[in-house]
Amino acid sequence: MRLRNITGSREVIADSPYVVQEAILEQCPGTWHTIFGNNHPVHIEIGMGKGKFIHAMAKEHPEINYVGIEKYSSVLLRAIQKMEEEELPNLKFIRMDAEDIAKVFGKGEVDKIYLNFSDPWPKDRHAKRRLPSGQFLARYDVILKKDGFLEFKTDNRDLFDFAVEELEPAGWKAEVISYDLHADEKLMVGNIMTEYEEKFSSMGNPICKYIIYR
Ligand code: SAM
């Protein structure tokens, strides 16, 4: 998702109390419980887009701290506007490329990772940019606690097949693999639809989901 550049979005982000600012990111590893002021588990969504999913999750689970990560200022701006309408104490945002995720969270500091409708990067030479790639799984391996889980949803079957193939060589195992999430009553319990999930499922696309661990 890349909205046209919105004038002033960088300034809004720089002034927002909901955003953990770039200048202090390198001090963050190991300090997330201090940032939130409690010892609740930390769940993150990488590539959150406009933040519909993570905002709804944070509202529904006040006992969990959420961090939404998004690369583009113009997209993050929408998530900030949502927080201005409905402020939640257990949700923070970071504007960054997730390539550097292991510089922002300490070893095993994250309890759960969500990837939702990640960009497919269809060209082979861009495979390592895909958020469920082996290269990214290695970064998640550092920050995710030992018995933590990662959940991934997409309607893109090629990306999903790629993601499943990446698991074994990277040392991850699947607890759940579904090629039609919305037809699975058990998996749908507590499912919060992302913006893309709403869009693509309304077009009739089946939604794939895996839940993985090491
Ligand atoms: N998760 C949302 C949803 O399901 O509705 C948005 C999906 S959108 C297709 C993917 C989002 O991931 C975009 O907003 C994009 O900017 C962001 N993104 C892609 N690669 C990223 C990266 N390396 N680091 C941070 N964000 C990234």
Image (spheres, helix red, strand yellow):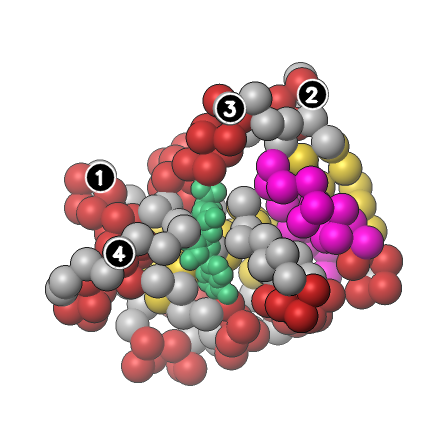
Number of the label disc, if any, that sits on residue 4: 4
Tell me whether the residue at label 2 lies in contact with that at label 3, contact meaning CB atoms closer than 8 angstroms. no
**Amino acid, disc 3:** Met
Characterize the local packing of mark 1: few (<14), some (14-19) or many (20 or more) Cα atoms within 10 angstroms. few
**Amino acid, disc 1:** Glu
Looking at the image, residue 85 lies above or below residue 164 = above
Task: Choose the circle earlier in sequence order: 1 or 3.
Answer: 1
* Residue of label 3: 203
What range is drawn magenta here? 146-165
* Residue of label 1: 86
Q: What element carries label 3?
A: loop
Mark 2 vs mark 4, CA separation in Å: 37 Å
Q: Is residue 34 left or right of residue 169?
A: left
Mark 2 vs mark 3, CA separation in Å: 18 Å
Residue 35 location (% of width, % of height): 36, 65
Task: Choose the circle earlier in sequence order: 2 or 1.
Answer: 1
Mark 3 vs mark 4, CA separation in Å: 24 Å
Task: Choose the circle earlier in sequence order: 2 or 3.
Answer: 2
Residue 91 location (% of width, % of height): 35, 51
Residue sitting at x 40%, y 59%: 70
Looking at the image, residue 197 lies above or below residue 188 = below
Residue 163 location (% of width, % of height): 72, 52
Characterize the local packing of mark 4: few (<14), some (14-19) or many (20 or more) Cα atoms within 10 angstroms. few
Looking at the image, residue 160 lies above or below residue 193 = below
The number of callouts visible is 4
Task: Choose the circle earlier in sequence order: 1 or 4.
Answer: 4
Residue sitting at x 53%, y 54%: 119
